[in-house]
Image (tube, rainbow, N blue to C red):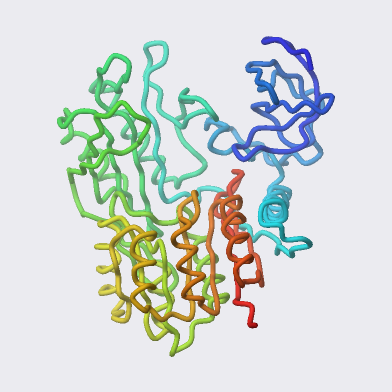
Amino acid sequence: MDLKLGDILEGIIVDFTYEGKGVVKIDKFIIFVLGGVIGDKVSFKITKIKKNFAEGEVLEIIEPSKDRAKNKLDLEEAVGVIPLVEYDYEKGLEWKREKVKKDLEKIAGLKNIEVKDTIGMDKPYRYRNNVQIAVGEKNKKIVIGFYELGTNDIVDMESSILISKKANEALKAIREWIDKYDIKPFNKKRNQGNIRHIGIRSNKEDKLMIILVTANKKIEHTEELVKSLKENNVISIYQNINNSKGSATFGKEYKLIYGHESLIETIGKYRFKVSPNSFLQVNTTQVEVLYDKAMEFLNPQKEDVVADIYSGIGTISLYIAKKAKKVIAIESVKKAVDDAKYNALLNDIQNVRFLKGKAELIFPKLVDEGLKINKLVLDPPRKGCEKEVLEAIIKVSPERIVYVSCNSSTLARDIKILVENGYKVVEVQPVDMFPHTVHVETVVLMSRVEK
């Protein structure tokens, strides 16, 4: 197809990409466009041209999709954070189910695989218990908000429908503090300024932890900020120092400015310590649904010895421990392991062995040393499992595996390997952990094929 930058075309959005951009096909040539939902007929301008695809931005919605959301929201957030918010929520749940199914068919080679309907939320807003909000400058004005999809451009916002009202009040107080005391945002190119991001964590009680990410060790006027935030349900304020020029949001050094060292979160019957850098699923309501489903699939019994690989702060481990004989939990982040041990004490659980180290090193070593387990849980990061972990699983051959994944592509890749080595997929359940985005959490039950 003969395209030039700046060309204006028309087409119908037929799908979403893994980022949330719209997919338009013209004469079999694929164009990814920013803005719009499936079914929209749009006009768009070409902004980038590659050999096998092009990119564009929507200029006008000529004919709106019949599947557009009926609710009208006054949105300030970037489309990169909530790209499906204008798409009918139930249709979005169907799309996520189909995405999981397609990945299992195309990548894992599983034909006619049954995938259950995605479990959604009754109220799919204000669900995030953890956000990182960027601070920058545009046209000599402070901008505070999320990044627009695929860019480093911050979309300025006064509030967000992703976080609680109390969290929005705290964000407003921080904005006012930045304006009043002329706190300069960090500029990577000039290596000037200080504040880079605002982290906000919350628990079910709407108690808040604020994390100010700065380039310098010193922050001016913190006493005034503490005084303001204490009136907004904030019980903990940290400074995180990140003086790198890279893209990482957080640096390694955390400094407690005010209040408690951690939040206490309740999931089901259990209580968990949440530190500023703890990994915890961002949707507290849906995480209970997710863990209940994982427990249903695992079906732990009093004689079971279970491995929990990529165990984080011990959330799934402690769920399992009450019903199993023993749990071996493996996690690479020291602070997460420390929190997990604290959480075990907090919940009076004594039959979990927490091990710190990379899963690809620790788990194969345990297996070589004769580890005996009969069930296993995997909850890896988006990149999925390392091949060493999969090889060790195949060697130890647990009768039942529960795989929890936030990336259906790497999930399918790993399942393919397990299926080729003696396992079958029994059940697949998507859970909508991230409403109005293209991301979906999936729980898969696998069992060993008896010879």
Q: Is residue 383 left or right of residue 297?
A: left
How many circles with numbers are drawn on the protein? 0
Res 373 quadrant in image: bottom left
Q: Is 142 drawn above or below residue 315 in the view shown? A: above
Q: Nearer the viewer, residue 98 or 84?
A: 98
| In the image, farthest residue toward the right | 27
| In the image, farthest residue toward the bottom | 303
Residue 342 position in % (x across, y down): 25, 68
Q: Is residue 166 left or right of residue 193?
A: right
Q: What's the residue at 45%, 85% (across, down)?
A: 304
Residue 106 position in % (x across, y down): 71, 51
Q: Nearer the viewer, residue 97 or 262?
A: 97
Q: Nearer the viewer, residue 287 or 234?
A: 287
Residue 142 position in % (x across, y down): 37, 20
Residue 398 position in % (x across, y down): 51, 77
Q: Is residue 90 left or right of residue 249?
A: right
Q: Is residue 161 left or right of residue 347?
A: right
Q: Is 152 drawn above or below residue 81 in the view shown? A: above
Q: What's the residue at 33%, 75% (across, down)?
A: 369
Res 274 quadrant in image: bottom left
Q: Is 296 drawn above or below residue 105 in the view shown? A: below
Res 211 quadrant in image: top left
Q: What's the residue at 40%, 35% (across, down)?
A: 133
Q: Quadrant of the N terminus?
A: top right
Q: Quadrant of the C terminus?
A: bottom right
